[in-house]
Image (spheres, rainbow, N blue to C red):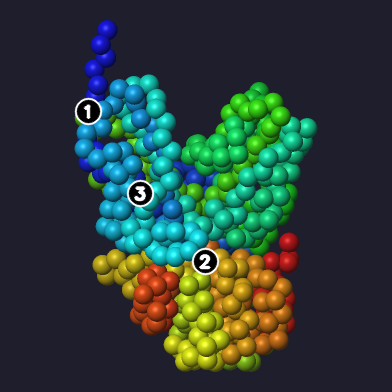
Amino acid sequence: MIKSMSEIKSSQITEAVSYLCKKAACFLPEDVYMGIKDIHSRETCEIARNFLEEIMINSHLACKARRPMCQDTGIVTVFAEVGQDANIIGDDLELAINKGIERAYQEFYLRKSIINDPVFERINTGTNIPAVIHTKITPGSSIKISVLPKGSGSENMSAVKMLKPSEGIEGIIDFVVETVKNAGPNSCPPLYVGVGIGGTLEYAAMLAKKALMKEIIPITDLEILAKTDKTKELELKILNEIQKTGVGTEGFGGKYTAFAVSLETHPCHMASLPVAVNLNCHAARHAQIIIDENTDIPELIGPDFEIPPLKNHTNYFSYKKLTLPLKNEDIDSLKAGDRVLLTGEIFTARDAAHKKLVQAIKNEDKLPFDLENQTIYYVGPCPAACGEVIGPAGPTTSGRMDAYTPALLDLGLKGTIGKGRRSPEVIESINQNKAVYFVATGGAACLISEKIMSAEVFAYPELGAEAIYRLRVKDFPVIVGIDSKGNDFYNRI
Ligand code: SF4
């Protein structure tokens, strides 16, 4: 019997990928949203509950505005399962996929984060491509395309290790827990933890990423399934061990550090036990579609589920209000853990801008702005869409700025805003210079951008998303991470 081939146009693939990238950026999948909501209902730590509320409100804002929930719209991983009876007409598969990503990132004002060369030039491609594409040939004549855009905060903290078979299940659990602990606040917990076990080194890493596409099982259902299913039992065991780390939401403690663990396994060599851990932040974005020759790609309308109404975050009444630039007496009065609303002017800068600033200091060149009493926000916002002051603009991982920060503090910089822990050298410098480190809610990019009243590119425009912006903010919510005495609020756990 002769099987008929189906003809799928490459333009359908391009359109499908573009649709999926837009959908994933703006709308959290229902299972992820419900997973976060579930741990919010169980959480007893007030600070963790507040952060979870901000995260959920941020999801609502992103859905409503059809804007990315996090400014780091990531590198796009694509899983393409291509039916062996599908004949792709036009561009080749990879080109069709990359065209779709480029289109989505351009049309939807998503942040383009891909650089051309990891070692030498590190120049932004300006298109957010190429993607990382995993292709599998499957039976049938349709193509299943799954996209998983992922930011660097959680991807950078992921890990792979070749265990000895004798380390067994306990070794696997220990490695996952160690990876979560090591990531601390940097990966924007609560997490969805993907674990790949088996295959080879690179295959385990791919499995861990693929695990993040699996539907999340609510904790109560997982507890029931774990009684009869070995894999579910291990997922539950790992999840419970992760919760014991106490890292908590945004790394400030609490009962829940993860809302789900998902395993993918594959046979492996008798002498091997490869294990990969892919940490996904609370912005656990993914979307998929199956297309055949008759598929019309839908318009992006809204999320696939009805988001339950959520009251506005009302806890701001307990926050201290501070105006910028920071005054010494204000800084003196702040203690690690204080919640603060900032109003006034701040400058943005992240990796590339810091490198330039510090180079300028070394060369004794004039800096683009006087650092005295200023506050720098570590952010690389999305481009502004029509009518926006700025695109979604949540904090990036502060640790990457550690090597540069003491030099800036020594020149009078008083405040920094970001997310995650700082190095002992930075803490010492904050203490010596009587400065302060504020933490903003990682991944709450839409919520934070609502607090930005004006934005202008101020220096280094050639750096694109990494340019220095001057922002005017109003009631910008932060928590004191490190106070001027060097007390570190992350040490509370
Ligand atoms: S939520 Fe945090 S880790 Fe996730 S993409 Fe956004 S900034 Fe990165």
**Which is in the foreground here, disc 1 or disc 2?**
1
Which picture quadrant has residue 322?
A: bottom right
Task: Give the label, 1 or 3, closer to the camera.
Answer: 1
Find numbered disc 3 in the image and state the secondary structure of the residue it sits on.
helix
Left or right, residue 421 beside residue 74: right
First in sequence: mark 1 vs mark 3: 1
Separation of residues labelled 2 and 3 (CA atoms): 21 Å
Q: Which residue is mark 1?
A: 7
Quarter where residue 167 is shown? top right
Helix, strand or loop at label 2? It is loop
What residue is rendered at 44% in x and 68% in y?
Answer: 380
Position in image of residue 414 (x %, y %) = 59, 86
Left or right: residue 265 versus residue 489 is left
- Amino acid at pointer 3: Cys
Quick one: which residue is furthest to the front in this view? Answer: 120
Label of residue 396 in the image: 2
Q: Dot 1: few (<14), some (14–19), or many (≥20) neighbours within 10 Å?
A: some
- Look at the numbered disc 3 and say if its residue's Cβ is closer than 8 Å to ligand 1: no
Please name whichever residue, 315 or 437, is drawn nearer the observer in this view of the structure. 437
Mark 1 to mark 2 CA distance (whole Å) = 44 Å
- Residue under numbered circle 3: 21
